[in-house]
Structure formats: structure tokens, C-alpha cells
Image (tube, rainbow, N blue to C red):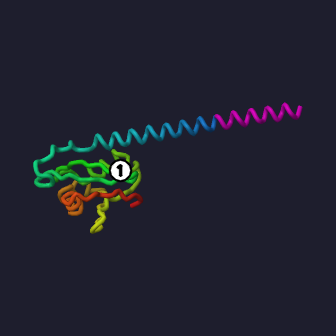
Amino acid sequence: AREANAARDAARAAAEAQAEREKQTEKERAASARAAAFRAAAHASLPPEPEPEPDPNVGDVWRARFALPDGTTRTRRFRASDPLAAAFAFVRALGGAGEREAFDLVTRFPRAVIREPSGESVARETVGGCEAFVAAAASGGALFVERGA
């Protein structure tokens, strides 16, 4: 009888462990789907990427290089009139930051910190009006994603 009880307890424990693993897998799947939907929405919010101008970083189009936390770099062109928030949306679309994850764009030398626009400044701040963004683009330097801003 004791052996039967032990076998029953072991089977129940194994079934509970399996159910817990399946529940965890489903949570991870749902989180991954939410993250993918968030990245897609961030990508859809981006203004169209302008065509390159004959002379890079002269005129209305700025080519910016972003260094992401995973060590990769990505480049994108922005119009000077594009909202600065578009640069932050671009980083989020690439998975460089999560939905509610605060981050800054930072240049290395001289160090300059570009904070994500919020509130009323979202509509006012433009790529071309941000000195640190323009300086990084003009020099070919990267804008580093610094999390935990």
C-alpha cells in the first residue's frame, strides 16, 4: 500500500510539474507575441525613410547609426523635420528597448544624452532641431542605446 501511495504521489507530482512547464511555455509564447506586436506597431509609426541625398548629411536628410544593446548596429535615414520620437520608435521597432522600458540615445565623445521626448514636446522636437543627433549623424558616430534612463 505504501508503494502504491508513493507511485501515485510521484505520478501526481510529475503531472503537476508538466502542467507548470506548459503554463510557463504559454506565458513565454504570449510575451513573445506581445513583444512582436509592439515592435510591429513601433515600425508602423515611423515616417517613411527618405531616399539618400547625393551628399550624405547635407540638406534635409540625416543618416544616423544606432548601436543597440545586443551589440548590433543599424542605420536609418531621417528627414530633419521628422519628429525626434521617430528615432526612439526606430530603436523600439528593432527590439532595442521594450514597451515600457526607458532609454536614452547617447553619444560617446563628447558625451551627449538625448532623452526621449514626452508630453507636449513630442510634437515639437525634431531630428534636425536636436544638436546631439545632428552632430552624431554628421560625424558618422553612433547613437548608443542606454537603458534604464
Res 17 → quadrant = top right
In reply to whether residue 133 is colored magenta, the answer given is: no
Above-or-below relation of 133 to 15: below
Residue located beneath label 1 in the image? 72
Q: Which residue is at 22% across, 44% downward? A: 47
Outermost residue on the bottom side: it is 110
Q: Which residue is at 30% across, 52% downward? A: 88
Quadrant (top left, top right, bottom left, bottom right) of the C terminus: bottom left
Q: Is residue 18 left or right of residue 131?
A: right
Describe the element under mark 1 as helix, strand or loop.
loop
Q: Which residue is at 23% across, 60% downward? A: 136
Give residue 59's position: percent from left, percent from top.
Answer: 10, 54
Quadrant (top left, top right, bottom left, bottom right) of the N terminus: top right
Q: Is residue 66 left or right of residue 27?
A: left
Q: Is residue 51 left or right of residue 10?
A: left
Q: Is residue 6 left or right of residue 72?
A: right
Majority secondary structure in the magenta region: helix
Give residue 124's position: percent from left, percent from top.
Answer: 21, 56
Q: Which residue is at 25% across, 59% downward? A: 141
Above-or-below relation of 11 to 114: above
Q: Amino acid at mark 1?
A: Thr
- Disc tally is 1
Give residue 132's position: percent from left, percent from top.
Answer: 23, 63
Give residue 84's position: percent from left, percent from top.
Answer: 24, 54
Mark 1 is surrounded, within 10 Å at the Cα level, by few (under 14), some (14 to 19) or many (20 or more) other residues, namely few
Res 102 → quadrant = bottom left
Relative to the observer, which residue lies in front, 71 or 117? 71
Q: What range is drawn magenta here? A: 1-18
